[in-house]
Image (cartoon, rainbow, N blue to C red):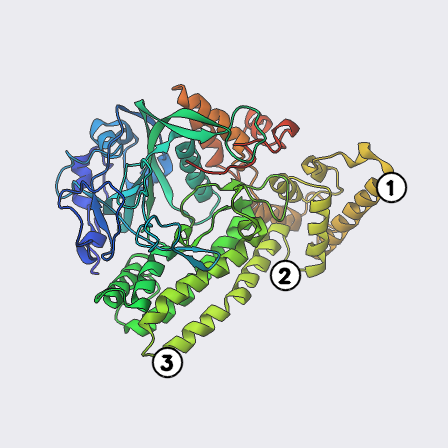
Amino acid sequence: MKQPLSRETVFEVTNLEELAPMADYSLMDHLTPDPDATSDGVDHRPRQVFSGHYVPVRPTAIETPEYVAHSEDLFRELGFADSLAQSDDFIRMFSGDLSLVPEPMRKLGWASGYALSIYGNEYTQQCPFQTGNGYGDGRAISVLEAVFNGRRWEMQLKGGGRTPYCRGADGRAVLRSSVREFLAQEHMHALGVPTSRSLSLYVSKTERVRRPWYSRGSHSLDPDQLISEPVAISTRVAPSFIRVGQLELFGRRARKQEHPRAHEELEQLVLHLIDREYNDVIDQSLDTPTKLVMLARAFRSRLASLVANWIRVGYCQGNFNSDNCAAGGFTLDYGPFGFCEVFEPFYQPWTGGGQHFSFLNQPAAAERNFKSFCSALRPLLTAHEDELAQLEEIHSGFPEVMQAEMEKMWSAKLGLEAFDVELFRELMMLITQTPVDYTVFFRELSSIPDDIAPIKKSFYRSLNQAGGADSDALLKRWSDWLAQWKSKTGLDGAGDGSRLREERSRCMRRVNPKYTMREWFVVPAYQRAADGDYQPLRALQDVLTHPYAEQSNAVEAQYYRLKPSELFDLGGVSHYSCSS
């Protein structure tokens, strides 16, 4: 795929007429549409899609849309004026109505199919047709691909109505889940974690849907009532939305020779992925087998780094299937995710996720997704023994690469030059047994405390008040560990004003955030938003997009604190059975 000439933005885009010339639809121009698709994009009923890389779909606009929020940071990166988010033509387009977009923008969006693998195991029975040809973007519709300041972005509506992959659902997203994803994407970006981004969020003032959810104060694992909620559309942005599950779908078809063009379609998709996501690291003049080997190695590196970053900031994806794993190596599809508060190795916000997708098991889940990724590439290398052997070597080397990333991450969080196994193991025991707040503990440790008093701010129970031999022993272990840690860092003799101590503290604070996306902050924000008050959401957005900063005393008092005891095990706050 030939990259278009760089279109440097020398002014702020204030309307769609100014945005339109930047449109460049590489996926629709270079890949194959479903041959059974309708010409007008009115393709909203569940059906099997047997071939082709995408289905042209006309989004279903939400009724009477109202502006809720946009990402000022992303607008600035794209060269958009903030006023654009509240302009009539922009609201119309990004609430699902493409009928009036100016040329060369297109009046049809597109949805893509993908396969499902859960923890590396292939599934087809959840497909309504029992064939695997019904999985895909059920309520996600891409509406624009464009180049801004020399960088290609794809913009995708979440909640834009039905597609052939909707499996009987309504294709809508509710405001509650849209607020969560909107905030989470920009928070993760601010944390320095590769992620899709949030562009805008609009809510319907009249359209509502019924969803299962938790009643106030419910401790049930599953929702215990049906509630009426306003529908919303959020727009997420990424270099592409190609998933491991998407490659896997075409890999399965090629492996099984399901249709005459199956092998060709797989190769087209993989090369398109390289053009979109790896153009800076893979030379386009190389032969395809060499490119595939380089792709596998590059994705392995990105995926291992990504998951280590997730654990660094306390993020748990919750449902890390291959279809929720971006082939570009960034965080995608914020469903039943959560941020670890009380440290628990098997923390899992999704009641249906099990331990295999829990917090510290995410490296193992990533390895299973990498297995699916490599399996998708194999049909293209069956006639190339050397490259196939290299692919197998890259696959088998994932645990070692993942472990190296994890050790580097833990060393950075602890301010160590090199990973110390014994020091780390004792810390894991201590923060589990105490227990501690994951974010508060590492942030307080970043101040290089002289004793354990500051890190006690992270304790979810007071060991001093508890008393007893067990509590005394645990406090002594904490003091001993802190002394050993300071010795390992070379700071045991450094005074408060030493340059080494100040520099080490700065480095630790750059990797250990002060503010994290705690669900009990988000719940009142989306509840108020449902009543038309968007100010709490925007205030929280401002805090979460500056997670490492020392903010005002008022912000610290409100957002830098432990989870209240009455919120533990609360449905919709501590856990979810769905994301809606």
Image height check: is 460 above or below 371?
A: above
Residue 6 in the image, given as x and y percentages of width and height: 22, 52
Specify the quadrant of the image occupied by residue 156: top left
Query: Is residue 327 visible to the viewer in this orientation of the structure?
Result: no
Image height check: is 325 above or below 546?
A: below
Q: In the structure shown, which secondary structural element does the residue marked by tag 2 occupy?
A: loop
- What residue occupies the far bottom of the structure in this picture? 385
Query: Is residue 120 visible to the viewer in this orientation of the structure?
Result: yes
Q: Nearer the viewer, mark 3 or mark 1?
A: 3
For image coordinates 70% across by 40% down, the residue present is 455
Q: Which of 183 and 119 is in front in this view?
A: 119
For image coordinates 34% across by 63% down, the residue present is 252
| Residue hosting label 3 | 385
Specify the quadrant of the image occupied by residue 559: top right
| Residue hosting label 1 | 469
Q: In which quarter of the image is the C terminus?
A: top left
Q: Distance between the residues labelled 2 and 1?
A: 34 Å
Q: In the structure shown, which secondary structural element does the residue marked by tag 1 occupy?
A: helix
Residue 296 in the image, given as x and y percentages of width and height: 40, 66
The mark that comes first in sequence, 2 or 1, is 2
Q: Nearer the viewer, mark 3 or mark 2?
A: 3
Q: Nearer the viewer, residue 334 or 116?
A: 116
Residue type, numbered disc 2: Ala
